Amino acid sequence: MGNETLSRIKGKLIVSCQALEDEPLHSSYIMQRMAVAAMRGGAAGIRANSVSDILKIREEVKLPIIGIIKRKYTGSDVMITPTMQEVDELMAIKPDILAMDATNRKRPGGRELKDFFQEVRDKYPNQLFMADCSTLEEGLRADELGFDIVGTTLSGYTSYTKDVSLPNIVLMKELAKNAEKPVIAEGGIWTPEQLRHVLDAGVWAAVVGTAITRPMDITKKFVQVLQS
């Protein structure tokens, strides 16, 4: 099943359909319609946040889903599927791929990634897991720890990578060359031309989110041009 999922997304576009509680489009129904639009536009997969959004999207969209739960905990900057609670919630509906933060940052409760992921893998040995990383070191470490997919999702979003230029094609290229597992490129892909460059870097697939599914941020891009 895992190989089938990976083959369905190889060389193709995954669209991230997410809206947090403080965003205008926060609604499982709206995310479903976003995912339907992405599917009809030719997307090969969807990345979605929360059990309710995933279930709603599944009603209409039969593409592989990368599932996450974003949740904030005091004392930790890790937000993407940060604890076993979020893993268990997602596994109750079994997304095709389950993604989690795989940066070097401490998880809630001060847990290290290595120990946490070992516990997760032991509990769910047959699930496909994606590591959301921000650096080459983190990506190669996740590869060694046994993640099935390595992603560049968090490049530019950790305190120690906030100054990198996105999309981080250098990181994507280095991970694709050095990691044994498939690499999914994600982060800062705004144009079809950038997507072409990203896929030419040798990655397995690529995720585009904000540029397609966040009209507030897209509007800001246009407005900034008028203000400059």
Image (cartoon, rainbow, N blue to C red):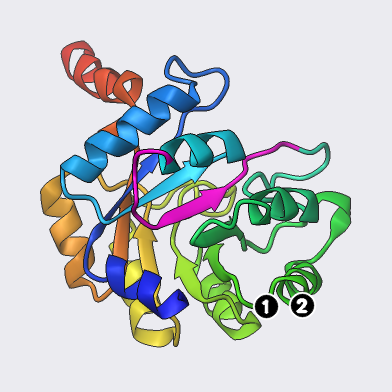
Residue at image mark 2 = 122
Q: Relative to the observer, which residue lies in front, 111 or 62?
A: 62
| Mark pair 1, 2: CA separation | 6 Å
Picture coordinates of residue 12, whole percent (x, y): 22, 62
Q: Residue at x 70, y 55 (%)?
A: 87
List the single residue furthest toward the front.
59
| Residue 200, picture quadrant | bottom left
Picture coordinates of residue 155, whole percent (x, y): 46, 55
List the single residue furthest toward the right.
109
Q: Mark 1 Cα within 10 Å, few/some/many (few <14, many 20+)?
A: few
- Image side of residue 147 versus residue 176, left or right: right
> What is the magenta range?
59-72
| Residue 102, picture quadrant | bottom right
Residue 125's label in the rendered image is 1
- Residue 225, compared with residue 150, is above or below; it is above
Does the magenta portion include 69?
yes
Mark 2 is on which residue type?
Answer: Asp
| Residue 101, picture quadrant | bottom right
Q: Can residue 84 be seen in this view?
A: yes
Q: Which residue is drawn at 26% across and 25% down?
A: 218
Q: Relative to the observer, which residue lies in front, 158 or 193?
A: 193
List the single residue furthest toward the left.
193
- Image side of residue 147 versus residue 45, left or right: right
- Image side of residue 210 versus residue 104, left or right: left
Mark 1 is on which residue type?
Answer: Pro
Residue 72's label in the rendered image is none
Q: Relative to the observer, which residue lies in front, 181 or 121?
A: 121
- Residue 152, compared with residue 78, is above or below; it is below
Does the magenta portion include 167?
no
